[in-house]
Amino acid sequence: MAKSKTNASAAEKFFIIGKYKSLLCTDCGTTVEHLDVETVTVICTKCCQKRLNPYSRFITDNIPDELLNTSFIKAADKKEKSDEYKPPRGWQFMAVYVSPEGYVYHKGEEQPELFNTLSPTEVKPKELTEKKPKLTSREKDELKTNIMSEITKLKEQLTESTLKKGDRKKIEKQISKEAKKLSKIK
């Protein structure tokens, strides 16, 4: 279904398939597909990138077209940047921070007169805390009913008996603790 036609003025070969047109690159001669029908000349992506940055190490004739997507280039850039030193998070807010090169910072501002006078700041890795397992709705309901039953028992003890003031306060504290436990359950 593809028709090949020659344009006498431009002396280029092109193919029209449906609404789209395919042309040859003016620099290297590779075919560029899915162009508008009115397009006269075209430059492929490789040649365009070579024109923008001829010294780029990513754009060479040896790299296949599949590897020239942006995700490949971004991944390579990340590998290079990971070798660089990064100060710890929040170093601007530390009272004194000394970089491995010897620069001294006081609350994020460099102190040139203190260069190489202090030893580098040692950053301790953050300790990971164990997460509590999440409760299912059934377990939550059971917990709520248990706490509510304990609260009712404690309230019965308060009303039935004639206790000393110290004993009453202890029971009231227990009731408030149980009420806090109940409010923490979501």
Image (cartoon, helix red, strand yellow):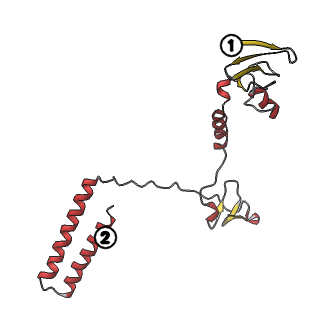
Q: Residues within 10 Å of mark 1 (few under 14, many from 20)?
A: few
Q: Estimate the spatial distance between the alpha carbons at disc 1 and disc 2, rounded to whole Å.
A: 77 Å
> Which residue occupies 11% across, 81% down?
160
In the displayed image of the protein, which residue is found farthest to the right? 9
State the image coordinates of residue 79 (x, y, percent, origin top left).
64, 38
> Which residue occupies 67% across, 56% down?
99
Q: Which comes before the other along the chain, label 1 or label 2? A: 1
Q: Is residue 99 above or below residue 72?
A: below
Residue at label 2? 180
Q: Which quarter of the figure has residue 131?
A: bottom left
State the image coordinates of residue 163 (x, y, percent, origin top left).
15, 85
**Can you tell which mark lies on residue 2?**
1
Quadrant into which the N terminus falls: top right
State the image coordinates of residue 121 (x, y, percent, origin top left).
61, 59
Residue type marked 1: Ala
> Which residue occupies 17% across, 87% down?
164
Residue type marked 2: Lys
Q: Is residue 95 above or below residue 64?
A: below
Q: For the residues carrying marks 1 and 2, which lies nearer the camera in this image?
A: 1
